[in-house]
Amino acid sequence: MYKSSKRSFPVYDSLRQAIIEQALKPGVKLPEDSIGETFGVSRTLVRNALVRLDAEGLVDIQPNRGASVAEPTIEEAYDIFDMRQCLEREVMHRLCQMEPGPIIKALKAHLAEEDKVLGKDGTRSIRLAGEFHILLAELTGSQILANYVNEIVSRCSLILARFAQAHSAECGVEEHAEIIEAIARGDAEHAITRMHGHLRGVQDRALLNPEDEREENVAAILSRYRGPGG
Amino acid sequence: MYKSSKRSFPVYDSLRQAIIEQALKPGVKLPEDSIGETFGVSRTLVRNALVRLDAEGLVDIQPNRGASVAEPTIEEAYDIFDMRQCLEREVMHRLCQMEPGPIIKALKAHLAEEDKVLGKDGTRSIRLAGEFHILLAELTGSQILANYVNEIVSRCSLILARFAQAHSAECGVEEHAEIIEAIARGDAEHAITRMHGHLRGVQDRALLNPEDEREENVAAILSRYRGPGG
DNA sequence: GATTCTAATATTGCATACAATTCATGTATT
DNA sequence: AATACATGAATTGTATGCAATATTAGAATC
């Protein structure tokens, strides 16, 4: 999917991951120079990555003023969560019409993974929780639906970074289990209801508290995200 | 929304419009040099536009081989139409829960416009038909839903360019009128049913015939799309 | 005549240079 | 002290140059 430049992808991917995992907090400036130095590429490639992230809503580019991590408003947050409800409802609907065998197998494998790291590795836990929803979408077999869900889950992570207090909005593993169970029974109505409740819970926990936190050196954060090839 | 470069926007927009209106047909090469000359900008800005269009699925960039108008497969076509059904169902659902007054007014104004050019200006007719769906989405007040619909309507146009025989897949104005009427009554079920049938009709007419047609000079086509500022 | 190889051409990938704009700092004025 | 202004530093916007890759054309071989 990301075909514009092989060498710009690591920049894009690292920035994206750092934003999703809330290491780069909303509002943090993303200067082309320093990011380029971090990854050993020129501003050209950094800019490509930033433009892409801007299109995805994770980064905000302002003319002549550069890029920074997007700061979704509370209105945008509600808008995005509503859209997420719509998309994930569609995912549930489709999955419940499919042969459950391989789906359930894949989901249970993922759930086991989630269970394994629960309480041990917070960051990985959050990442796996998000990936559960992406996996659901991918299992529908719809490329475009999976893309949309992937994108919107990222944006929800950003919203959590902005509005939720730390860890208050993690996905519950038991709730995931319940959703799997409904899909296994092919019970679309229940699956949709449970997913709805699940997402509603995340949203409610998220959209209550104001933000906090301070800045940190961008290069330092990114160096933790730079892959071995960088 | 397109903040990465003011001067690259016209390139992006013209290419996009040309693709949507099927002047640039699927598979046509889009060389950076010649496009840049057409618009009087450097390859840098052309590339920005192409990358963006690639992200939106209208253009296909292959490493070291450049960009060309995307050629969606028949499988992707079905996937995209299914997604469109999902999104526009959501639009109907939301509109029917809102105060109908201003919505109906805006829709009727648009319909009058569609009616006026019917049979006179084919290109404009097609454009207006697409914009009807975008207008519906915008009237929901959801930024992200409107964006998604906008994007997917574009991709459907591309699909029509690839698979439908000319003009076989235009939206019917009467069908639009019926949808408006259902919204006016706040009858979500009917509105959804009608929209579904409407889109189904477009899809069925589209996904039957193979492609045809031949190439034409890219610069010549684009010069027709270049705005007065170019 | 078809096919492979090779040289020439064209195109893309990326870095860099320079201009334009914004931002930061310090000075002058009130 | 606060504001306005001016100057220099930093950052972005864009074009261009060079290397790398792909494409084309032509010659040579079968």
Image (cartoon, coloured by chain):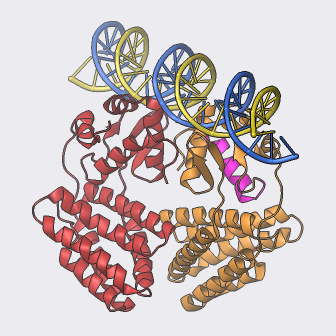
Chain colours: A red, B orange, C blue, D yellow
Residue at 29% over, 42% down: A227
Q: Nearer the viewer, residue B82 or A203?
A: B82
Q: Is residue B12 magenta?
A: yes
Q: Nearer the viewer, residue A44 or A104?
A: A104
Residue at 58% over, 57% down: B57
Q: Position of residue B3 (x, y in %)?
A: 52, 43
Q: Position of residue B138 (x, y in %)?
A: 57, 67
Q: Position of residue B44 (x, y in %)?
A: 59, 33
Q: Main secondary structure of the magenta part?
A: helix
Quarter of the picture holding the C terminus of chain B: top right
Residue at 75% over, 53% down: B24
Whether residue A91 appears in this view of the structure is yes
Outermost residue to the left: A120
Rendering quarter of residue A138: bottom left
Q: Nearer the viewer, residue B209 or A146?
A: B209
Rendering quarter of residue D8: top left
Q: Indicate left or right for D15 with A99 as reference.
A: right
Question: From the viewer's perspective, is residue A193 above or below residue B217?
Answer: below
Q: Is residue A57 magenta?
A: no
Q: Indicate left or right for B102 with B165 as reference.
A: left
Q: Position of residue B28 (x, y in %)?
A: 73, 50
Residue at 49% over, 62% down: B143
Q: Indicate left or right for B117 with A75 as reference.
A: right
Q: Which residues are magenta?
A: B8-23
Rendering quarter of residue A123: bottom left
